[in-house]
Image (tube, rainbow, N blue to C red):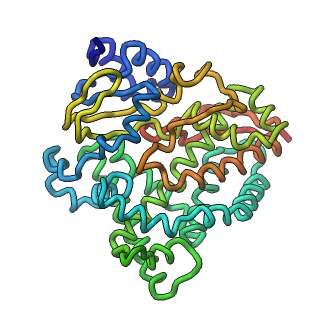
Amino acid sequence: MPEIVQSPDVLALLDELTRMEGRANPYPRYARLREASPIVRAADGALVLTGYAECTTMLRDPRLGHMPPDLLEVLGYPDWRDHPALLTLYTSMLTINPPDHTRLRRLVSATFTARRVQALRPAIEKMVDDLLDAMSGTVDFVDAFAFPLPVNVIGELLGIPAGDRAQFQSLTRDWTQVMEVLNADVLSRADPAAATIREYLGGLLDKRREHPTDDLLSALAQAEAEGDSLTRDEAVTTAALLLIAGFETTTGLLANGLAALFEHPDQFRLLAERPELARSAVEELLRYDSPVQLGARMVAEPIELAGVTVNPGERIVAYLGAGNHDPERFADPDDLILDREDNGPLSFGGGIHYCLGAPLARLEAQVALPALVRRFPDLAPAGEAERRNSLTLKGFTRLPVHIPV
């Protein structure tokens, strides 16, 4: 009979994933967890999933939902609405449940359309060319390319003036720490960052209400569907979510992707020689080292996971990066194979919470990575890279590269 495993070895592996050495390369630890059981119990009581099938169920099954924000009161934050970082996160589409999520998603989807995303392709191609033109010698790939490209793309989409965009790198890193761990020290940095973002976007939104232009902020200010519309707070919160989602994950995808190509020079050359593989290459890079490594839900109704009945009230954490390396779903999962067929990474989530910005992130990477390796076929790592000390959002804070003259 299947059972939920909680053993000293399992707890030790989970503990290693809270440390930098475990986060830098979590995949061997994921494999050992999965060998123990596709469902294990952490020290804090949460159930941890590492199998592709189980992670997929967590993402898509309506019997699992996000933690109701009122539970923050039980966790010691009865004043959570007075914390800008918590208010913005826990009233956004990222974490709310139906019917509120259904309403917000419908309103925002009417403005953030596939047509609007595809219309950005010429602008993205020009941004990529301009950034590549400026790269020479030894540079930090994150600062020179992986951050400025997506922040300028989402800035262009939202209508944020070019001179105001750079500030959001440090602001969003401070704010998104609450996705990793919640304590007074984290909130002391996250709250001012979230407040600054809200104040800035709120001011810009008010200007767009008075003088709309052809950008997403203007569309959010005027969003209507079935006789409903976004309130000012909802529009500001949505704009903040789109902003951080618009560049955080894409910055991670670009930097993680290049690091993976460095580790597999044959695949680097393959992409340079066959740029038509852009679509499958991006899916494989998403699978191989996902910029988003985990997701969490709470059980609302009894459900079977890995042959075990899980009861309401249980907290579930799915290691999406582990699911992406499950040998039951992917042949040779630890190999990077850019022309892999039948790919299906979990990196953008699934179900009703599937990432709204996934098409934009994919488009940017599909344009950027082939252009990068074609322009600089001898691009190489240079010096010590610095990884972000986070598992939820996996990436680099610094990735030095050298372009031979």
| Residue in front for this viewpoint, 103 or 197 | 103
Vertical side of 381 occupied by 37: above or below = above
Vertical side of 190 occupied by 253: above or below = above
Is residue 144 visible in the rendered structure shown here? no
| Residue in front for this viewpoint, 43 or 376 | 43
Would you say 300 lies left or right of 16 here?
left
Q: Residue 186's spot in the image, x, y percent? A: 30, 47
Residue at screen point 24% across, 24% down: 43
Q: Residue 227's spot in the image, x, y percent? A: 37, 78
Indicate the quadrant containing the C terminus: top left, top right, bottom left or bottom right: top right
| Residue in front for this viewpoint, 191 or 80 | 80
Residue 203 occupies which quadrant of the picture?
bottom left
Is residue 335 visible in the rendered structure shown here? yes
**Residue lying at the far bottom of the rendered structure:** 210
Residue at screen point 50% across, 44% down: 348
Residue at screen point 47% across, 56% down: 244
Vertical side of 194 occupied by 342: above or below = above
Would you say 390 lies left or right of 281 here?
left
Tag count: 0
Indicate the quadrant containing the N terminus: top left, top right, bottom left or bottom right: top left
Q: Residue 54's spot in the image, x, y percent? A: 40, 29
| Residue in front for this viewpoint, 390 or 338 | 338
